[in-house]
Image (cartoon, helix red, strand yellow):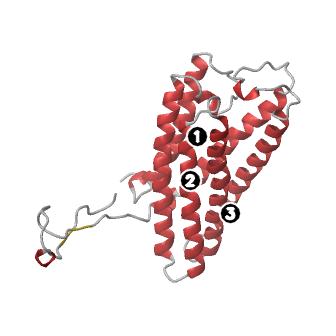
Amino acid sequence: MWWFQQGLSVLPVALVVWSAASFVFSYITAIVLHHVDPLVPYISDTGTIPPERCLFGIMLNISAFLGMATVYVRYKQVYALNPEKSKILKINKIGLTLGLMSCFGLCIIANFQKCILYYIHVVGACLTFGVGAVYMLVQTVLSYLMQPEVHSKDIFWIRLTVFLWCSSSIVSMFISSVVLYSGLYGTNLVQKLHWDPQEKGYTAHIISTVSEWSLAFSFLSFFLTYIRDFQKISLRAVVSLHGQTLYNTPQSFATDEQTLLVAGSI
């Protein structure tokens, strides 16, 4: 058995590989068609013009689905490991909510392009990266509370390091974006896909784009830390039948028989 076949470790692996591929494939397509500049464009700019827009959208939607599945499995795992610790259980529920919100934001990014519906796109980015960063913080706190009984201190320090990387990228991107779009370097920069290094505002633009790529890969790196944890968990789905047919029958004739529909790992 390969390492990614153990438990549900395939979930975070698929999430990271697929999400990275969605960025890379869209970038390559946009560069080949000369829709953006080769030197570090905004990730959203690589998914603005067809055909890369179609590829960007469908791949990020699948990433959002994989993200929701990963967040849910993480929630169930923490719950199962700490059934009687009310503090951890409460924080765990908060983490589930934040994680699902972040994945929903990714759907918004995928379906509302930056150059078409900018403000909705920004809302999606805030949900994905802003709320997502808080999700990372919550999971880091959970890792702290569960060590050393559940896992080693190393995983806590790794997640804390990735969270600090994410936070620094957010701060850098926010400051450079505020400077860039303050009006000092012109208007309607949101629609601008090609930049000349000699233009005013180019430095702020590069800092902002590099920060965005750094932020995206800090998220992917955080989910990589789930791989070892997910090797230790499997889920099963059970269906309860209330009758042997699908006809409407009196309640007195309903049976209590339960049938196991899916057994084994998902």
Disc 2 or disc 3, which is closer to the eye?
A: 2
Task: Name the secondary structure under disc 1.
Answer: helix
Q: CA distance from mark 1 to mark 2?
A: 19 Å
Around disc 1, counting alpha carbons within 10 Å, would you say few (fewer than 14), some (14 to 19), or many (20 or more)? Answer: many
Q: CA distance from mark 3 to mark 1?
A: 31 Å
Q: Quadrant of the C terminus?
A: bottom left
Residue 36's disc is none
Residue shown at 69% from the left, 21% from the top: 37
User: In the image, what residue occupies the spot 64% across and 65% down?
Assistant: 138
> Residue beneath label 3, please?
157
Depth order, front residue of 125/136? 125
Disc 2 residue crowd, few under 14, some 14–19, many 20+, Cα 10 Å: many
Earlier-in-chain disc, 2 versus 3: 3
Q: Is residue 202 above or below residue 62?
A: above
Horizontal arrangement in the rendering, residue 237 relative to residue 193 (left or right): left
**How far is mark 2 from mark 3, CA to CA?**
14 Å
**Sequence-earlier tag: 3 or 1:** 1
In this view, 159 is above or below 22? below
The numbered dot on residue 223 is 2
Would residue 221 be visible to someone looking at this image? yes
Identity of the amino acid at label 1? Answer: Ile
Residue sticking out furthest to the bottom: 84
Q: Quadrant of residue 32?
A: top right
Picture coordinates of residue 23, whole percent (x, y): 57, 34
Residue 237, given in percent of the width and then of the height, sits at 31, 64
Q: Which residue is mark 1?
A: 109
Horizontal side, residue 225 vs residue 232: left or right: right
Amino acid type at mark 3: Trp
Asked if marks 2 and 3 touch (Cβ < 8 Å), the reply is no
Residue 217 appearing in the image: no
The three-letter amino acid code for the residue at tag 2 is Phe
